Structure formats: structure tokens, C-alpha cells
Image (spheres, grey):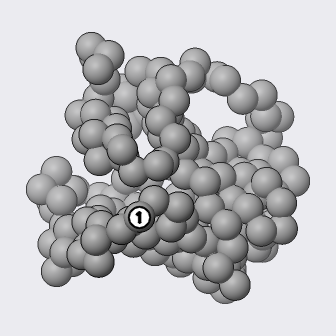
């Protein structure tokens, strides 16, 4: 593995190795979106993300991401990963309108909704909407000096791609299809 990767990226890369999920190395700025002030985007503009998304392409593994429609100042979501019918990982997700910013928040949990040790005491992982296009949203943060980026993109009416990146040039891609 590449030296210098942040622990959460290494952990994700190890978890996804052999799952059928695409692991890729990419430059931090690999995608060219138009940077926009998030104040120009309303939370309702992200309603295209709502739905039940699934990846069960590998025997014995199921990855699901589900998003509710925007309501008030938030959209709620969850991620569930099962291996051979057993919980491997949960994530609680939210996209919230906070003043003039739209932010993505997440927390990781093991089975039993036990939070990950490095997330027990502090705030959730938080990223701010920095770019948007038709059916595409990019959230970024630089917490603790480490750049993080998550991109959501509707590839078609029935396909969603989620890309997790770090400033260390690592990317993890999730390819989903609609379960609805």
C-alpha cells in the first residue's frame, strides 16, 4: 500500500479489497466540476440522490445506501454493508442546510450500533458542498489538515456512483444500481 495514506483511507481500502468495489488511485483534483458557492444551491436541488441504492454483485456481500427526500433543513441516509449475511459496517448519513452552507455528515458504526473508537467522543465527519452539477454533488473538508472529498453522481436514472477521496491520492468507488 502507498506510504503516507491516512488511517481511515487504509482501513477503507483494506475493507473493500476483494469486495468487487472498485479501488482506484487518482489525483485529488481528478474531476473538473465548477466550484460554486453552496449558498446558490438549495437542499431541494439534491433530491436526485433520494432512493434505495444497492450493490450485490459479489457473492455473499451486500452494500446498500438509502437516502430520504429532503425535508426541512435535512436529508437523512444510511449505509449498510453485509458480508455473508452478517453486519460488517453501518453508517448514519445526513446532508443539512446550515445557514448558507450545505454540509454532509457521517458516523461509522459496527454491529450493535457501536460507534468506531475514533468517532466516539468527537463530532461527526463533516464536509461542505463545494461544487455541483446536474445530478452531481461534491463535498470537501480539511479537518486536521487532511483533505477529504466525497462525490455523489447519478450516472443514469438507475445508477449512482459514490467516490471517496483523500489528499493522499487514494479513491474508493462505489457503484450502485437502483433497488426501487
Relative to residue 24, is residue 160 drawn left or right?
right
Give residue 153's position: percent from left, percent from top. Answer: 72, 52
Q: How many marks?
A: 1
Give residue 53's position: percent from left, percent from top. Answer: 61, 71
Residue furthest left as drawn: 117
Asked whether the viewer can see residue 86, the reply is: yes
- Looking at the image, is 63 positioned above or below residue 66? above
Give residue 3's position: percent from left, percent from top. Answer: 27, 14
For the point 61% across and 54% down, the residue is: 175
* Quarter location, residue 143: top left
| Label 1 CA crowd tier, 10 Å (few <14, some 14–19, many 20+) | few
Asked whether the viewer can see residue 12, the reply is: no
Please state which of residues 84 and 7 is positioned toward the viewer in this rendering: 84
SS class of the residue under badge 1? loop
For the point 73% across and 62% down, the residue is: 159
Quick one: quadrant of the N terminus? top left
Give residue 180's position: percent from left, percent from top. Answer: 69, 84
Please state which of residues 26 and 124 is positioned toward the viewer in this rendering: 26
Residue matched to label 1: 59
Amino acid at each position: 500500500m502507498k506510504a503516507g495514506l491516512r488511517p481511515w483511507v487504509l482501513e477503507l481500502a483494506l475493507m473493500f479489497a476483494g469486495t468487487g468495489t472498485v479501488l482506484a488511485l487518482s489525483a485529488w483534483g481528478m474531476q473538473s466540476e465548477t466550484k460554486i458557492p453552496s449558498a446558490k444551491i438549495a437542499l431541494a436541488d439534491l433530491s436526485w440522490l433520494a432512493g434505495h441504492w444497492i450493490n450485490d454483485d459479489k457473492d455473499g456481500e451486500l452494500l446498500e445506501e438509502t437516502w430520504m427526500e429532503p425535508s426541512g433543513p435535512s436529508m437523512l441516509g444510511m449505509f449498510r454493508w453485509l458480508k455473508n449475511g452478517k453486519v460488517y459496517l453501518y453508517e448514519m448519513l445526513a446532508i443539512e442546510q446550515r445557514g448558507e452552507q450545505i454540509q454532509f455528515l457521517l458516523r461509522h458504526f459496527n454491529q450493535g450500533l457501536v460507534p468506531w473508537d475514533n468517532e466516539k467522543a468527537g463530532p461527526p465527519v463533516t464536509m461542505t458542498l463545494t461544487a455541483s452539477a446536474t445530478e452531481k454533488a461534491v463535498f470537501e473538508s480539511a479537518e486536521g489538515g487532511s483533505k477529504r472529498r466525497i462525490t455523489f453522481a447519478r450516472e443514469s436514472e438507475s445508477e449512482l456512483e459514490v467516490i471517496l477521496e483523500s489528499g493522499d491520492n487514494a479513491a474508493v468507488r462505489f457503484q450502485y444500481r437502483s433497488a426501487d
